[in-house]
Image (tube, rainbow, N blue to C red):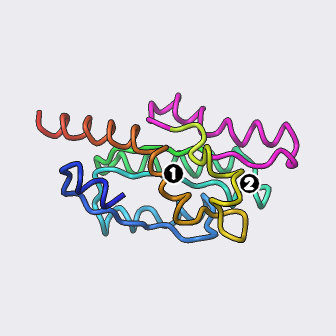
Amino acid sequence: MQNRLQSQGYEHQVVNASISGDTTEGGATRIAGALEKFAPILVILELGGNDGLRGIPPITMKSNIRSMIEASRAIGASVVLLGIRIPSNYGARYTQAFEGVYRELAEELDVPWIEFFMEGVALNKSLMQEDGIHPNAEGQTILLENAWPVISETLAISADTSNT
């Protein structure tokens, strides 16, 4: 993403404040410190997979993501939400509630989002690491392509807003 930003003329610096294996609770706990330290203009939230793997109630996940969105906006940052999906073996009710969290927050808080960030990657073994959970380098390239339209649009809107 850093290379894409530079090639598009942006001078922004990408900071990855994620922790592998983290849940939305961990993200909600850590976001205030990250916002203070980095003062971002854009926060890209892609969390929840580990919540799903642990069976954390979607209502809890939603509350945690909501608090991260609100904290980010409180410092003037724009937010992009990258939705994910979980395997159907968690049951239809849990799976639907889990996936609904992203759509509901996007609608309720008017957040630009992508319904399934890992489209074209998640079920392709050649694009995944051996753990079957995380994308490899080639998969990461596709993820950037999936996310770039909403990220670049949000950056453009942020730039227009800051220039007025």
Instruction: Quickly name the residue at label 1.
Output: 143
Q: Which residue is rendered at x = 52% and y = 28% of the image?
A: 107
In the rendered view, would you say 65 is above or below 34? above
Instruction: Quickly name the residue at label 2.
Output: 52
Q: Which residue is rendered at x = 64% and y = 69% of the image?
A: 21
Residue type, numbered disc 1: Leu
The percent coordinates of residue 140 (x first, y second) are 51, 59
- In this orientation, which residue lies closer to the viewer: 71 or 91? 91
Provide the residue span drawn in magenta: 84-113
In the rendered view, would you say 113 is above or below 87? above
Q: Secondary structure at mark 2?
A: helix
The local crowd at label 2, few if under 14, some if 14 to 19, many if 20 or more residues have their Cα within 10 Å, is many
The percent coordinates of residue 7 (x first, y second) are 23, 53
The percent coordinates of residue 113 (x first, y second) are 49, 37
CA–CA distance in space, label 1 to label 2: 20 Å
Quadrant the N terminus occupies: bottom left
Q: State yes or no: residue 111 in magenta.
A: yes
- In this orientation, which residue lies closer to the viewer: 40 or 13? 13
- In this orientation, which residue lies closer to the viewer: 100 or 143? 143
**Quadrant of the rendered image containing residue 117:** top right
In the rendered view, would you say 147 is above or below 132? above
Residue 157's disc is none
The local crowd at label 1, few if under 14, some if 14 to 19, many if 20 or more residues have their Cα within 10 Å, is some
**Quadrant of the rendered image containing residue 4:** bottom left
